[in-house]
Image (spheres, coloured by chain):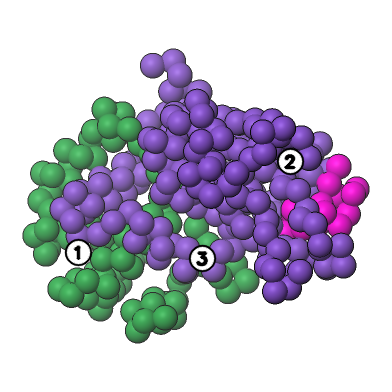
Chain colours: A purple, B green
Amino acid sequence: MSGRDSHHPNAPTDLEARALALESLLVEKGLLTSEAVDGVIRAFEQDIGPMRGARAVARAWVDPGFKRRLLAAPKAAFAEIGVTEHQVEELVVVENTPTVHNVIVCTLCSCYPWMVLGLPPTWYKSAPYRSRVVIEPRVVLREMGLEVESDIQVRVWDSSADIRYMVLPLRPDGTEDWNEDQLAALVTRDCMIGVARPAVPSAVA
Amino acid sequence: MSDVDRAIAGLEGLPRRNGELVFEAPWEGRVFGLVVALTKTPGFEWEDFRRLLIAEIARDPDADYYAKWLSAFERFVLERRVLTNEELESRKSEYASMARDAVI
C-alpha cells in the first residue's frame, strides 16, 4: 500500500511488535484496557512530555521573537528551551489565529510529535478519530467539547513519519498580566493537538 | 499514589530526566504502562514481576532498559498462563509482517 509507506516506511521493530502483541492480547482477554495503560503512563510521566510543548507555547506568547523562531525554525526554538532530541527536526508548528483553527491527526497510523507532547492518547490512535476528523472536523471537535465558530476556518494537518505537527494555540483573553509559568499551566496536550482551547479558570480570570 | 506506584517510582535504574520518568519511544511507555496496570490486579503481584525483571537484568545487563521490562513481562504473563507462547508469537508475527495495523 503506497499510502502506508509514507507513514511507516518499515514494519514495526521486533520490540514494538512484541509490545503490541502483549497489549492487544491482554485487552482482548479483558485483563486490562488501553485507557488504563494510558492513565498509568500519564500519571508517571507527570505530564513532562506535554510540558515541553506547553513551555514553548507560553514562551511564544510572551516573546514575539521566540514565536517567530518557533514557527520558522522549530528545532532551533526548542533547543533554546532545552529540547534537543533529533526527532524535533520533523516538527512543524501551525499557528491558530482569530480566523484559522488547526487540528492534527495521523490518518494512516499514529504519527505524533511525542518528543514535545508526550505519548499519544488512545483516542488519537482510534480509527474513528483518524478517519472522521478529516471528513467532518467541526463535528468531531464539537463532540470533543470544542465549538469552532462558523467564521473560523478549520485546517486539518495529516502527520507522517517525516512531518509531525503541533498547534500553537491563541493566547486566551484575560491573561495579559500572566507570566510564562502561569501561562504554561494553561496549555494542555489537547490544546496542542487542536481539540481544545486554553481556558482561563473563571475563578482566576 | 498506591503502594505499587510508590514501589515503582522508587525503582532504581528507571531512565529519568530531572527526576521524572522519560520514555525514549512510545513502545517503552506502553510496556511500562502495561506492567503497572496489570500489577494492580490481584494475582499479578508487582513483587513477582520485579523478581523476573531483576533476573532479566542479570541475564543481559547491556540490553536496552525497557527491552528487559518487555522480556520480563512476557515471562510474567506466560508463567501465569493468561497467554500461551503460541498466541504471543503468532500475534507478534501479524504485527511484524504488517498483516495487523501497528498503531503504537
Q: Whole-percent x and y of residue A4?
A: 43, 23
Residue that badge 3 annotates: A45
Q: Residue at x 72, y 59 (%)?
A: A55
- Asked if disc 2 and disc 1 are in contact, CB closer than 8 Å, the reply is no
Are callouts 2 and 3 both on one chain? yes
Q: Which residues are magenta?
A: A55-68
Indicate the amino acid at tag 3: Glu
| Chain of the residue on which disc 2 is drawn | A
- Identity of the residue furthest to the front in this view: A150
> Which numbered marker is on residue B41?
none
Q: Whole-percent x and y of residue B104?
A: 40, 43
> Which numbered marker is on residue A96?
2
Q: Of helix, strand and loop, which one carries label 2? A: loop
Q: Is residue A19 visible?
A: yes
Q: CA distance from mark 2 to mark 3?
A: 27 Å
| Chain of the residue on which disc 1 is drawn | B
